[in-house]
Amino acid sequence: MALTWIRTHDWDADAWRNRSLCRDSNADLFFPIGSTGHALDQIDAAKDVCAVCPVKSECLEFALATNQEAGIWGGTTEEERRKVRKDWLTKQRRAG
Ligand code: SF4
C-alpha cells in the first residue's frame, strides 16, 4: 500500500517508539474506555505522561497520518485529533 501522506518530521517510523515514555506505562491509561468517570482520570494521567514525552510530536504526527481513531496519542484524545486532523491534512496538501 502506498503512503499518501507527507512526513513533516524527519523520523523513522519505528525509531521514535523506542524513545516513548509510554513503552513502560500501563497501556490501559492510553486506551481508556469512554470519556467519562474513571476514563477521565486515565486520560489525564496519560496526558501527564505525554506532556514530558520526548517524542510527542512524532507520536501525534504518526497518529494523524495513520488516522489512529482510538487512544491517547501525542497528548490528544480521539475527539481532539478529529478536530485538528482537518487542519493537519490541509497543511500536508499545501506542503506537498
Ligand atoms: S506522546 Fe504519549 S502516547 Fe505518544 S509516545 Fe509519548 S507517551 Fe506515548
Image (spheres, helix red, strand yellow):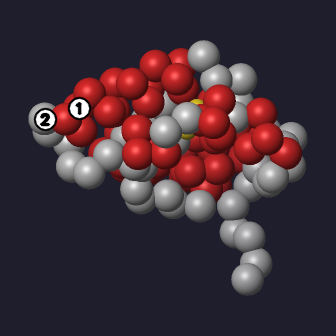
Q: Nearer the viewer, residue 86 or 54?
A: 54
Q: Is residue 28 above or below residue 53?
A: below
Are the two marked residues, 2 and 1, in contact with CB atoms closer than 8 angstroms? yes
Judge from the rendering whether residue 96 lies leftward or rightward of residue 76; answer left or right: right
Judge from the rendering whether residue 94 lies leftward or rightward of residue 44; answer left or right: right
Residue 22 visible to an observer of this rendering? yes
Q: Nearer the viewer, residue 21 or 81?
A: 21
At x 46% / y 19%, what residue is drawn?
A: 48
Q: Residue 27, position in %: x, y?
A: 49, 45
Residue type at numbered disc 2: Gly
Within the image, what quadrant is residue 52 found in?
Answer: top right
At x 44% / y 30%, what residue is drawn?
A: 46
Q: Residue 56, position in %: x, y?
A: 63, 30
Question: Which image quadrant shows ligand 1?
Answer: top right
Residue type at numbered disc 1: Leu
Q: Nearer the viewer, residue 83 or 33?
A: 33
Q: Residue 4, position in %: x, y?
A: 70, 69
At x 41% / y 58%, what residue is drawn?
A: 69
Secondary structure, mark 2, is loop
Secondary structure, mark 1, is helix
At x 26% / y 51%, what residue is drawn?
A: 33
Within the image, what quadrant is residue 11 found in?
Answer: top right
Counting other residues with Cα less than 10 Å from the Cα at mark 2, is it few (<14), some (14-19), or many (20 or more)? Answer: few
Q: Which residue is mark 1?
A: 40
> In the picture, which quadrant includes the N terminus?
bottom right
Q: Is mark 2 within 8 Å of ligand 1?
A: no
Q: Which residue is mark 2?
A: 37
Q: Residue 29, position in %: x, y?
A: 40, 38
Residue 87 visible to an observer of this rendering? no
Q: Is mark 1 within 8 Å of ligand 1?
A: no
Marks 2 and 1 sit apart, C-alpha to C-alpha, by: 6 Å
Judge from the rendering whether residue 51 lies leftward or rightward of residue 55; answer left or right: left
